[in-house]
Image (cartoon, rainbow, N blue to C red):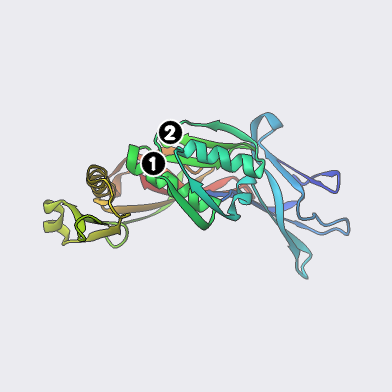
Amino acid sequence: MELLVESNGVIYDMTSCCTKLSLSESLNDGAGSLDFTYLYDGTEIIQNGSYVRLCNTSETDGVFFGRVFKTGMGQDKEVKVKAYDQIRYCKAKDTITIENETLTDLVTRMCNFFQLQTGSLMPTGYVLQAKPQCDKTWLDIIYGAVGDTLIGTEHMYCLRDEYGSVCLRDIADLQLPLIIGDNSLCYEYDWEKSIDDEFYNQVKLVSGNKKTGHADVYITKDTGSIEKYGMLQYYEKLENDSDPAKAKAKANALLKLYNHEKETLTFKCMGDLSVRAGNSIYGSIEDIRLNRRLIVQKVTHDFLPVHTMTLEVMTG
């Protein structure tokens, strides 16, 4: 690995002097971050705003590009530095109106507003419901649009920075030919299956009706699931006079999305730089009857003393 930092116009090669180096990112949950530490030798401490570049062997296979947001040192003279990619700037709050826009349009507008470099922005084709968004961060609005697009199209999209370029990708296009599990990279795992969080087998949507003066109620349910687990209801109040066909379609989509046990699985394994949040890998562990493709929700790469990674995954 090669770690370069540009501070006050001077480029420092930090590759050999780092004592810790890790890269973390989560699926649709903020910017990716690079954390590293080094021992202070009396020269200039890296300043906030400095550019940071992490490459495998050269700039052509870049891994991370961002800027320093935190730096500090203790009595042990170990300097700790945290850098984020450019998505960090999208935490700013604003008032935004969505009107006749797709998720792709919204991401493009955000990048133009913050003057961010863009890469591949996958067209989604799904027009979002028109509504004002007040006092929310741009990222919260984007992630809300990701969820709305998922319900409307059954396609999940990933917003991430790829070496200095903001990209919007369809999760279906991010499959890796990589097996993790028994006898393949993994040396430790932790697994859990739950109906305690984000599991619903009945969906109830309610919309006010100005003509009748009463509420329109839309309910869809899975009786077999209710018999097996008990009734667990999702409730949402829609805008007044919502279109009945769209309300019914949304109820059905929500039931399909939430009517399954939530499975969480964490791998600790040998590192592979191709693995990023949003990518999918194939999981294979005989003891828990795991033999299917999994989406990486969060990944942390630790490069010292050897390259390992911790993955939090979800079923695709």
Rendered position, 231 above or below 116 = below
Q: Quadrant of the C terminus?
A: top left
Q: Quadrant of the N terminus?
A: top right
Rendered position, 39 above or below 308 = below
Q: Which mark is residue 56?
A: none
Report helix, strand or loop for mark 2.
loop
Front position in the image: 230 or 285: 230
Residue occupying the point 60% across, 50% down: 90
**In the rendering, at what x and y percent does residue 183 appear?**
40, 41
Give the residue at mark 1. 149
Kind of residue sitting beneath label 2: Thr
Q: CA gap, disc 2 to disc 1? A: 8 Å
**In the rendering, at what x and y percent does residue 77 appear?**
79, 65
Report helix, strand or loop for mark 1.
helix
Rendered position, 102 above or below 138 = above
Q: Which mark is residue 124?
A: 2
